[in-house]
Amino acid sequence: MKKRSILVAVLSLCQITFIFAGGILTNTNQSAHFIRMVARDASLQIDAAYTNPAGLVKLKDGFHFSFTNQSAFQTRTITSTYAPFAGFGGNATKEFEGKASAPIIPSLQAAYKTGKWVLSGNIAVTGGGGKATFNRGLPSFEAQLAVLPGGINKLGPLVGQVIPGATLTADKYSVDAYMRGSSFIYGAQLGGSYEINDMFSVYGGFRLNIVNNKYEGHLRNIMINPTSNVPALGTGAMVSAPQYFSTLAQNPQMPAQYKALLEGYAASTADKYLESSQSGWGISPILGFNFNYKNLNVGMKFEFKTPLNVENKTKVDNTGQFGDGVNTAHDIPALFTVGASYQITPKLLASVGYHHFFDSSAGMAAVSNPANPAEKIEKQNFINGGTNEYLAGIEYRIDRMFLISAGGQITRYGSTDAYQQDLSFSCNSYSVGLGGEVTVAKNVAINVGYFWTTYSDWTKKWDNYNYLTPADQTPVPGTDVFSRTNKVFAAGVDFSF
């Protein structure tokens, strides 16, 4: 058995993410307009305050507002196969499910246009956006406990030396594991647009990003079933692991060097609790450009990388891994978007878009290097380039009052096996959104939409599962299959005066 903290895997908490539409750390679904049509990068409506701010110059003079609430629900499932898991329930394959929900995700878009100038702003949850609960913990947690029976079997010869003729084996373990996390990045954007002429307009602005993450969890009641021909050493019944190791260490015949080892095992299997939060802030400069000619409109936007660290504020941390005041890299990657829309007929509009997130250039929390698990490397080193998204949408105006729309998005991540972890994994996907708009008054419209995502499973095969087997021993392989589901409902109101 390795003498190490059973909860060292809790480090993965600092990378927890709740992704809806967008890249690894960015939400691009900022309005009901996006949910109902998806491709909005060339928008000339008020939602352009986020998607295409340079295009706001096509609004009428005056004040324009849009308020949206989204309700997002997501599941994340890790199906893990690791032979030692059979010690808890009898099956080497286990399913760990996390449910994330965010029933209230508000956003506000606003603009004031006068002549060639537009002052605009956007307030929204620009990253994260929910809470996730794993009622059975995570495979990286349980895997470190699953090796307990094997470790006890290796203690058998040691015990036989101390008590001649004694045997000691085990084949079962159990644990009460729980993990809950939440992640929000609140964004407040402000900037100005200028119309150079009828065809060209530009935008310059910035976004203030405020990060607020919270984590709580426990590993407790860790039990094992030591079995020995000496009843005092175990009868095969489930017993408390820390109490058992402590009792064994107190045996007066136990050599000092073995006593220290057993006391270390007792400490590592004691109940562990975590209650910590992280906070930080950063500024994202933003530039935009818009081209308009007759029925064609093209919008472009570039958001610069946001250097950002989050600081731990820890109340309880029995793991020794979340020191109060410690900072962790949490950069928001740069983002380039481009979109084009074409008014095919007075009633029919089609639109396409493309997003690229420069994930490889953004600082992220460190993870184990597969080539040398003892070495820690920032996660962006395990991303090939970044995230690419391809979007398309169409809307049809039935009459002056009603409009219907639909669209789709294909997302392809540059993630590699080394990037994927049980609390932070990215799966390629395609999404569909549909909905409509109802004009209820001259300057008031209601938008509604439904958006769902289908993800491709990601299978990660380990030669040495979670790097648990020491280098001088035969590694035990394993497999993790990552999958997820996502659905979003949205409703919003636009008004101007």
Image (spheres, grey):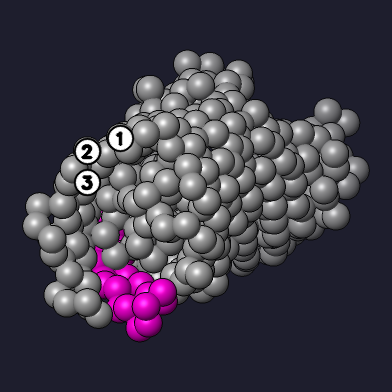
Whole-number angstrom distance, CA of label 3 to CA of label 1: 14 Å
Q: Is residue 351 left or right of residue 26?
A: left
Crowd tier of the residue under label 1, counting other residues whose Cα lies within 10 Å: few below 14, some 14–19, many 20 or above: few
Q: Main secondary structure of the magenta part?
A: strand
Residue at 59% in and 32% down? 285
* Disc 3: which residue: 341
Q: Residue furthest bottom?
A: 440
Q: Secondary structure at mark 3?
A: strand
Q: CA distance from mark 3 to mark 2?
A: 11 Å
At mark 1, the secondary structure is: loop
Closer to the N terminus: mark 3 or mark 2?
Answer: 2
Disc 3: CA contacts within 10 A as few (<14), some (14-19) or many (>=20): many
Highlighted magenta segment, given as a residue range: 430-457
Residue 119 in picture, x, y percent from top left: 57, 48
Residue situated in front as seen by the camera: 466 or 437: 437
Q: Quadrant of residue 310?
A: top right
The residue wearing badge 2 is 293
Give me the residue at 85% from left, 42% from top.
324
Residue 15 visible in the snapshot: no
| Amino acid at pointer 3 | Ser
For residue 486, say whether it is visible.
Answer: yes
Residue 254 forms part of the magenta stretch: no
Q: Amino acid at mark 1?
A: Met
- Residue drawn at the location 32% of the way across and 78% of the way down: 439
Residue furthest toward the top?
A: 371
Amino acid residing under circle 2: Tyr
The residue labelled by disc 1 is: 199
Residue at far right of view: 252
Kind of element beneath mark 2: strand
